Amino acid sequence: MRTTVGIIGAGPAGLLLARLLDEAGIDSVVLESRDRAYVERRQRAGILEQGTVDVLRAAGAGARMDREGLRHGGIELRFDRRRHRVDLPALTGGKSVTVYAQTEVCKDLIALRLATGGPLLFEAEALAVEDAETDGPLVRYRHQGREDVLECDYVVGCDGFRGVARKAVPPELSRVFERTYPYGWLGILADVPPSHDELVYARHERGFALLSMRSPSVTRAYLQVPEGTDADDWTDEEIWDELNRRLETDDPAWTLRRGPVTAKSVTPMRSYVHEPMRHGRLLLAGDAAHIVPPTGAKGLNLAVGDVVTLARALVLLREKGDPSGLDAYSETCLRRVWQAERFSYAMTTLLHRAPGATPFDDRIQLAGLDRITTARAAETDLAEAYTGFPFDEPQ
Ligand code: FAD
Ligand code: DHB
């Protein structure tokens, strides 16, 4: 098979890139190792930045998001038994975030691609990217038991953190920056209306807790747990009890609504950046190139930012013969990526309790939160980063 842009991976990055290229009349083939049901059900992100919402809408993938997504103008911080609301639009000139699950974004983009776009092959596993340094890069893949080759002008690795594309960059040209954290998140979905109408981020001596949602009738919540925890180590009752302990404040008006837990899993936490994000005619986008710990809700939004930059660069090349966008791709994305890395790291270390944390560490965290809740400059900095930086402008 031959195509202009070979896309490995049908997560948010690969699917949105395919859509943007379809719209620009640039042909592409998407290879996805899993089946459609798996991709549409994998529980992950839930928060879309303003820029992500705007991009999905402009790409014609916003109709259901506009109907079912929940626009949020604030987040709540809880610490030291206090509650503080961060008013996002007031601090950012009107920006907000939208609760609309990654599963739903993927479903919408898959439906669009299958109805109106080029090929999207499920259960098509990329085995290797070859000849990235030449004008004819290719992807070796296996589909329906047969090995085949996809010949491309460009290959884009949107195959997530454990994909194969990144391995095609020679080790001597790769630079990896990484940090792991000695804790993870135990995440649940529960059939019960959310206990608050906005997201709640809580710092507690027993560890971090996050109260989120997927819809007006479905709660999503996370608890910081030690590294290596198995989700089955926790009963549903223990999870609700612990959420209650960590989210409780001196305000008696708030109560935690409990309900049947329908899904439970543990996510490790990691910061990771692979530089550069381009090698010859291979480009990396999304989790294939970088991972953030989930605390700032940046991962999916960064993936969107990468493919917006990339689609613009490919359109510039196609329409004007101008390669400058592609040449600048890695540098343009990495600026935004490092801002998100910085923010996610700061939010993570501000709100989580590391094993062996000292009373000094506790006081530093509380001082950081006190600053955000009393100094408008500090609160504005948080609100700007949380709602997201513009996709193509210097940060
Ligand atoms: P992925 O979604 O990982 O997609 C990669 C795709 O490539 C997959 O479908 C995979 O099956 C496929 N693939 C892999 N290898 C191959 C191969 N060899 N051949 C073919 N296909 C292959 N981000 C946010 O912005 N906001 C949040 O609120 C948020 N919350 C999160 C909560 C949790 C619990 C987790 C785990 C993540 C969260 N994230 C969040 C991060 C976000 O989910 C990821 O950053 C996002 O999925 C990245 O998209 P992607 O398309 O780059 O990669
Ligand atoms: C969710 C995930 C996050 O990482 C976050 O910061 C907020 C919400 C969620 O899955 O709902």
Image (cartoon, rainbow, N blue to C red):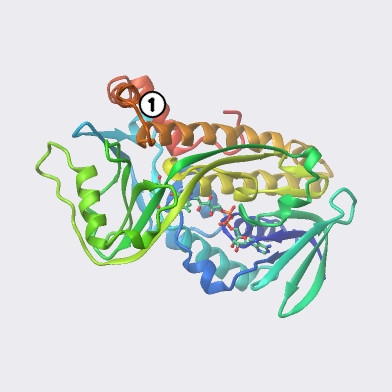
x 52%, y 60%: residue: 61
Q: Nearer the viewer, residue 381 or 161?
A: 161
x 26%, y 56%: residue: 239
Residue 313 found in image quarter? top right
Tell me: residue 364, above or below residue 88: above
Indicate the quadrant of ligand 1 in the picture: bottom right
Q: Nearer the viewer, residue 217 or 126?
A: 126
The percent coordinates of residue 235 (x first, y second) are 27, 62
Quadrant where the N terminus sits is bottom right
Say left or right for 178 vs 107: right
The percent coordinates of residue 114 (x first, y second) are 61, 72
x 27%, y 21%: residue: 374
Tell me: residue 161, above or below residue 177: below
**Count of numbered marks:** 1
Residue type marked 1: Thr
Residue 394 found in image quarter? top right
